[in-house]
Amino acid sequence: MNVKHIHLLGICGTGMAALAGILKEQGYLVTGSDEHAYPPMSTFLEGLGIKVLNGYQPENLEPAPDLVVVGNVIRRENPEAQAVLARDLPRLSLPEALNWFLVGPRRSIVVAGTHGKTSTTALIAWLLYATGRDPGFMVGGIARNFNANYRTGQGDYVVLEGDEYDTAFFDKRPKFLHFRPRMAVLTSIEYDHADIYPNLDRVIEAFQGFVGQMGEDGRILAWGDAPLIRQVCGRTVAAVSFYGLKEAAAWRAVRLEPATGGMEFTIFWEGRSWGRFFTPLLGTHNVLNTLAALAVMAEMGEKQEPLQEALAGFQGVKRRLEPAGEYQGVLVLEDFAHHPTAVAATLQAVRQGYPDRRLVAIFEPRTNTSRRRVFQEPYARAFKDADLIIVREPPDLWKVPEEEQFSSRRLVRDLTAQGQAAFYFPDTDRLLEGLVGLLQPGDVALIMSNGDFDHLVPRLGEALGGG
């Protein structure tokens, strides 16, 4: 492929901006377009010297690029996409481009699953780096050790977050079907992405396709405590090792104990003790993520001692139980949790880490799935570890048919009926005002959203006297 100039449609998306950085490092002329480009991605791209055109129009394709990469936010009716089709310009999707420009002949490790992908991917990348393997990686969040969500690297391995969401308007297959991993991690399978998957069976089919594409020379590390995952892994010819907390797991974590700033646990491999480890991450779910990452490294031949040392230096991923500050005795944490299972696991982790403090959960149902009533009842069970729950009206609820809409008011009623203290607010401005009046010194305020939550985190810090 004789390519010098590459143009990215939807360049300000997290993954697309990372690809832009990778391409720039490799010496390509990179341009891109997006709608309403704004910080932090606009400033990130500006710092790389990449020109971002604001708005989508055919003129953005002049002079004609040698290749166009189309993000999955772009719809077929997009005027710039229409021009790409009309001119028959060479095009790739994001995962295809990552295969071509980042992975190439190197060996890929792909982390897939409904939950835990980002943290596990970032952790494997860090362990590879800390043990001298110089990996490339692409992850769906900012890995704090690298202050970036990508790295080109020169080593033999590339670590990728494998997303089950669709690829592009011209390719409705899950993104992870474009990767051909030498090793894969499968963390979990649950119903999600209600905008593209009508039911759990279709989600299962997608993951069966993911494991089914691996050959006999491949290896899968899968969460073996879930019968569904064992069932799905029965569809692959690749070698499978299971990790988990139960005795049937080849890789097993036992004696989990909260420790200052994280968790301690002991690993058994095939029934034999493999060492005591500390992870600077809170919660049982993060012990499982860590166990998966360590198992990957061990099956590549790494020994315990270097991994114990490297693990202690892991700084996590931004917006994954990230402390935002402590103001007037209130510790503010920020997390990406939005699926009911993730909300419950995150709250349990905070409860384990701060057992003597009142836990205040602030939740914004923002995703295409959480704005739908499909999880109305599971959400009512997800907040059991919170002492006080604050729920916002879902933003952009009008995008969901009325009969399918999630009700924050009903969630608060259900929580109250269960004997929990819960409050509803129609928007972020009124939520902030009410929240400030409800918080007390000693509280842990956990803010959960997969979006910006209207800048709630810095605004709360300022309102509490931190800005």
Image (cartoon, helix red, strand yellow):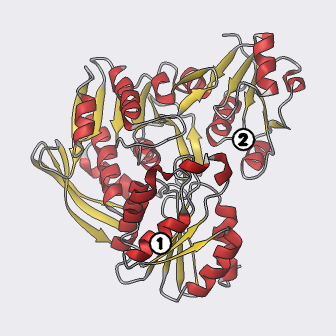
Q: Is residue 466 visible?
A: no
Say what secondary structure mark 2 lies in: loop
Q: In the rendered image, which quarter is residue 22 located in?
A: top right
At x 43%, y 69%, the residue is 414
At x 29%, y 19%, the residue is 217
At x 46%, y 24%, the residue is 177
Q: In the rendered image, which quarter is residue 108 located in?
A: top left
Say what secondary structure mark 1 lies in: helix
**Placement of 429 over or under 95, stated as above or below:** below
Amino acid at circle 2: Cys
Q: Is residue 186 visible?
A: yes
Label 1 belongs to which residue? 413
Measuring from the top left, give residue 106's x and y in whole percent. Answer: 46, 23
Relative horizontal placement of residue 157, taking residue 305 as reference (left or right) = right
Measuring from the top left, give residue 372's x and y in whole percent. Answer: 53, 50
Q: How many marks?
A: 2
Label 2 belongs to which residue? 12
